[in-house]
Amino acid sequence: MPDTLIVNEIYRTISGEGITAGLPCTIVRLTGCNLRCKWCDTTYAYDEGQRQSLEEIISRVNHAGVELSLITGGEPLLQPATPRLLEELCNAGHTVLLETNGSMDISGLDKRVIICMDVKCPGSCQADSLRWENLDYIKSQDEVKFVLTDRNDYEYARKIIQDANLIERCNVIFSPAWAVHQSHKRWLIEPSEVVKWILADNLNVRISLQIHKIIWPGEKRRV
C-alpha cells in the first residue's frame, strides 16, 4: 500500500536534541526498526502502530500548527512511502527533519529534508550496520550523531569524523547514552567526561543531552 504508513504516534512537543533542541516540534514516529541497539529507549515502536494514509498524517501535522516536523522511528526509511511523506511535508511549508539509523539508503531523499543520521558505535552492539556510502550524501545542514557509552565509543566516533572530514561538512553531534535500565543514574557515561575529551582534543562538535528526558524525567512516550 504505497500511500499509507504504519504510524506509532504523532504528537506536538519540543525537539529534544541536536541543532533544533528546544524548538516546538511535531513528531511523527513510524513503526518498525531493523536494528536492536542495546540502549534503545523506543522499543515500543518496533511493532506497535496503526496504518494511516499519507493525507491523514499530513493533515494531523498541519493541524498541530508547528513549522518544525520530525519524522522518526524505529527506522522510518523501512517503509516505502516515507520519502513521499517527507516531500509532501516540505511542499506544505514545514521544516522537515528525518532521524535515520544510517543503515538505509538516503541518496534519493528530497534535498530540503534535514537528515539526522546516527552512526552506531560499538556500545550499541550495532556498529556494523552503517551504510557507509550514506556519508557521501550528507549536506551542510544535516546532522551526524554518535551515541556514546564509553571512551571506546568516543575514540570510534573521533576516528570516523576525522576520516570522513565530517566536521567540515555537517553538524556533528555527540550524545551520551541514557541508562535506560539503570534508574540510579541518568547516563551510561557522564556528560562531563565527554566534554572533557572534546575540549582536550579540540573537536568542534556539539554535545546533546536529550533535554526532553530532563524536562520530563521518567516519561517514556510522547516527549
Image (spheres, rainbow, N blue to C red):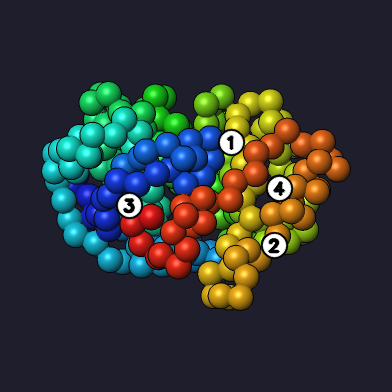
State the image quarter where residue 125 is shown.
bottom right
Disc 3 to disc 2, C-alpha distance: 27 Å
**Whether residue 190 is visible:** yes
What is the three-letter code of the residue carrying label 4? Ala
Residue 132 position within the rendered picture, expressed as x and y whole percent measured from the top left: 59, 42
At horizontal 36% and vertical 67% (from top left) the residue drawn is: 44
Instruction: Please state the horizontal and vertical placement of residue 87, each as a whole percent of the image.
Output: 29, 30
Q: Which quarter of the rendering shows the C terminus? A: bottom left
Query: What residue did someone put label 2 on?
Result: 189
- Relative to residue 163, is residue 36 drawn left or right? left
Mark 3 vs mark 4: give the one in front.
3
Mark 2 or mark 1: which comes first in sequence?
1
Q: What element carries label 1?
A: helix
**Nearer the observer, disc 1 or disc 3?**
3
Query: In this figure, which residue is indicated by the disc labeled 1?
Result: 135
- Residue tagged by mark 3? 29
Marks 1, 4: nearer the viewer: 4
Which numbered circle lies on residue 157? 4
Q: On the rendered structure, is 181 left or right of 28?
A: right
Report the residue at 86% width, 43% height from top. 200
Rendered residue at 41%/24% (across/down): 111
Above/below status of 105 relative to 111: below
Callout 2–callout 1 Cβ contact below 8 Å:
no
As displayed, is residue 85 above or below residue 112? below
User: Which element type, helix, strand or loop, lies under badge 2?
Assistant: loop
Label 3 neighbour load within 10 Å: few <14, some 14-19, many 20+: many
